[in-house]
Image (cartoon, rainbow, N blue to C red):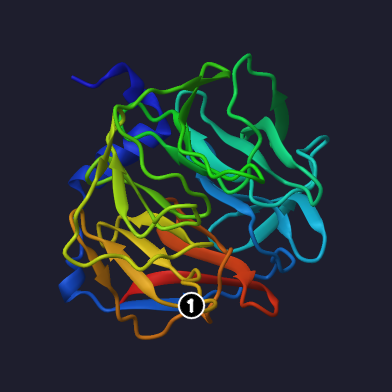
């Protein structure tokens, strides 16, 4: 019997992934391939980027390239298209996006606009290409670099951590019917922001690692929809920050690319195998970068990386991870 929530596009994707054949990572030859879209967003870093399962396209918002941005772009599997909306969130950086299957919308929270940390919530309706500011009665405090993700249990949008200009946070929130509800897990990861976060659709958990924090962040935690659990992988992921990740159903793993380990931007590719981290050896890789966007485009079956910066330049290239 199909659960009532499985009428959504997101849930159907989860069911398909559960039964899809996966290329074993040991037998695969991963390769990053640069795409050549006819149209592309201007160079930027720290934009929000996520897959909108309702319209089956990747959406990107805002970022920074010497100026704070608030433009909206959509990737259709081949090209980027700018969406001119009647209203939009104010220009900002470090505002992340997550898909909420219950409302069939993307949720955006907070960020930084150059003078203040933000605590507003915006809702993207892909079916009408509109942004609407929400006015929840309860909400996380203003912050940037919070980790947003789709909950592995009920597919609501969840939020963990972030930085408010003084302190790193470790609270967990969930978007339910137009309001943020603070969750009370029995354990929580050490406070952090700008770290690895991705929903592992095969194993139905969310994994986080790395990030910036006042205490150690070189540890890995998983969220099952009720509690956080600290993992003990035999191979640890380096302490990466300003990094992005997403699940790739082709390989059946969460892929982490780039970021910074304290010595500058990197171009390494890591995979979360469910219990352990694995350093990939792709045939070629995008140039080193941090603060880039990443999202898996289920419609075109592409794990996308866009933009970021290499420590000197803002980037505007689009890449896709393939198996050869």
- 184 or 11: which is nearer to us? 184
- Residue marked by disc 1: 266
Q: Quadrant of residue 187?
A: top left
Crowding at dot 1, Cα within 10 Å, few <14 / some 14-19 / many 20+, comes out as many
The residue under the point 46% across, 78% down is 267
Regarding mark 1 in the picture, which secondary structure is present there? loop
Q: Residue furthest bottom?
A: 283
Residue 298, image x, y percentages? 42, 51
Look at the image and tell me in which quarter the C terminus lies: bottom left
- 196 or 319: which is nearer to us? 196
For residue 255, side relative to residue 193 (left or right): left
Asked if 292 appears above or below 11 in the picture, the reply is below
Q: Quadrant of residue 117?
A: top right
The residue under the point 20% across, 60% down is 276
Look at the image and tell me in which quarter the N terminus lies: top left
Residue 132, image x, y percentages? 72, 28
Q: Quadrant of residue 315?
A: bottom right
Residue 189, image x, y percentages? 36, 42
For residue 209, side relative to residue 116 (left or right): left
Residue 145, image x, y percentages? 58, 49
The residue under the point 25% across, 40% down is 229
């Amino acid at each position: 019997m199909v659960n009532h929530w499985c009428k959504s596009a997101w849930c159907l994707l989860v069911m398909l992934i559960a039964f899809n054949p996966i290329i074993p990572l040991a037998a695969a030859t991963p390769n990053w391939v640069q795409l050549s879209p006819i149209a592309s967003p201007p160079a930027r870093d720290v934009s929000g980027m996520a897959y909108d399962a309702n319209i089956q396209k990747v959406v990107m918002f805002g970022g920074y390239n010497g100026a704070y941005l608030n433009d909206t772009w959509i990737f259709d599997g081949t090209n980027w298209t700018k969406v001119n909306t009647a209203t939009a969130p104010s220009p900002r950086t470090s505002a992340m996006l997550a898909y909420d299957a219950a409302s069939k919308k993307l949720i955006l929270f907070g960020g930084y606009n150059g003078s203040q940390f933000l605590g507003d919530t915006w809702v993207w309706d892909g079916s009408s290409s509109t942004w609407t500011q929400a006015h929840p009665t309860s909400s996380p405090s203003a912050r940037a670099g919070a980790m947003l993700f789709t909950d592995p249990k009920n597919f609501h949008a969840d939020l963990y951590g972030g930085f408010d200009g003084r302190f790193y946070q470790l609270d967990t929130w969930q978007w339910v019917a137009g309001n943020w509800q603070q969750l009370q897990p029995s354990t929580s990861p050490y406070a952090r922001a700008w770290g690895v976060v991705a929903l592992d659709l095969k194993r139905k958990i969310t994994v986080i690692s790395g990030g910036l924090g006042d205490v150690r962040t070189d540890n890995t935690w998983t969220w099952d929809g009720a509690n956080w659990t600290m993992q003990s992988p035999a191979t640890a992921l380096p302490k990466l920050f300003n990094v992005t990740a997403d699940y790739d159903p082709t390989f059946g793993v969460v892929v982490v690319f780039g970021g910074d380990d304290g010595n500058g931007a990197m171009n390494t590719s890591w995979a979360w195998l469910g219990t352990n981290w694995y350093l990939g050896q792709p045939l070629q890789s995008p140039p080193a970068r941090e603060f880039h966007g990443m999202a898996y485009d289920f419609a075109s079956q592409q794990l996308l990386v866009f933009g970021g910066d290499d420590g000197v330049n803002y980037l505007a290239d689009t890449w896709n991870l393939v198996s050869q």
